[in-house]
Amino acid sequence: MKKIILISRNTNVKKVFSGISKSPSFSLQIVSSGKNTRQDPETFRYLDVSGMDPGDIEEWIGTVSKIGCPWGIIDPDGTIEDVAELFHRGACDYLPLKSAKKLKVGRMQQAFSFHSTRRMSKMAEKRPVSKDAGCVSAPAEEYSLTWSNVKSGKKYSFCIMYAELLPSQEVRGKSGAKYQEEIQSAFHNLISREAGLYNGKVWVWNDWGGLVLFPFDGQKYDTILMAMRLLLNRVPISIDAGPFNSIFDFRLALHIGATKYKDRGQTGTIVSDDINFIFHLGKNKLESGYLYLTDSFFPLLTDELKKLFKEQGLYEGHRIYRMGSPYEIYT
């Protein structure tokens, strides 16, 4: 259950949060002052700045910044002149509340997700990962950081992502092939676009999913951030990228493995234990609403990131780790 502290004396603001107070996903505490509240860095704090002195607002922002907790500003009167500056200083949300409509659970989930994504990015920037941090045994000449060094017919180590869309009951109930094709195409384009931001390419793909390859230099692991964003932001990116306002339900896994490379569409003759393994894992072990890592990828993570994953046992000789999603309630 996610904890929220609302600091406000405004009756209308409290009414806006009334729906959140009834949600089993959140624990809402409403106080009239920000003093003497718990210092939990995981508790989301909202400050209603109605009628507040600018100096007091600055002091409060300094306090929550030291705590390191997620925070947001409620500004019914338009007091804040530069909203963008708030986000530069660490804000995770800004609510003008001009319409005075009740906040929805999904809206709050987005604010928590925004905080999680930004925190993951900061963790990844804290320290580089040494080459001996992982379990990759491929020789150095099989590593490649860029696609320009990858030649068809040669064997390389890649970061391999398995991604598969699970058709909803709504989609299964549609008899028209065109409807399903649009859903499939939207998911393919989403994965291709997001992977492209991290130098990845869709490689093997059927109607509902497949494999994405990322060149791997023996230590780089930032593809974890892309996968986390896909999972943590599943609802908003689905609405943004998918047709018919459908919510994508998908399986995700990351693995470091070696395979001979051939261009997309020419992969039918490739024989690779790692490719076989990731397909078996995807089809037989993965559940939707989670991100899975294998023991070839997990050791590359920082200690902070490792804490987000729980061991799930062995599968075909590989130890498997899993991170959950705040959007499990939608699956």
Image: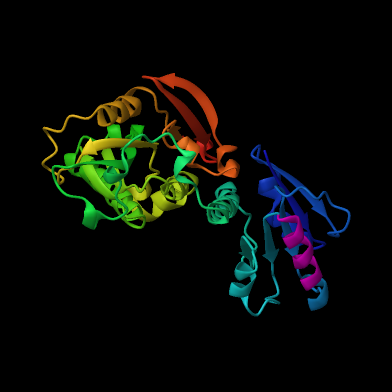
Q: Percent from the top left, x then y, of residue 138? A: 32, 37
Nearer-the-camera pick, 72 or 242 = 72
* Residue that extends furthest to the bottom in the rendered view of this protein: 81
Q: Percent from the top left, x then y, of residue 24? A: 66, 37
66 falls in the magenta region: yes
The magenta stretch is: 58-68
Q: Percent from the top left, x then y, of residue 29? A: 78, 48
The answer to whether 175 appears left or right of 74 in the picture is left
Q: How many marks?
A: 0
The answer to whether 186 appears left or right of 91 in the picture is left
Residue at the image point whose x is 32% and y is 44% from the top? 140
The answer to whether 6 appears left or right of 229 in the picture is right
Q: Percent from the top left, x then y, of residue 235? A: 46, 47
Nearer-the-camera pick, 222 or 67 = 222
The answer to whether 115 appears left or right of 268 in the picture is right
* Residue that extends furthest to the right in the rendered view of this protein: 36
Is residue 187 among what the camera can see?
no
Residue at the image point whose x is 36% and y is 19% from the top? 316
Is residue 273 among what the camera can see?
yes
Up/down of 30 relative to 253, above or below:
below
Residue at the image point whose x is 11% and y is 32% from the top? 269
| Main secondary structure along the magenta-highlighted residues | helix
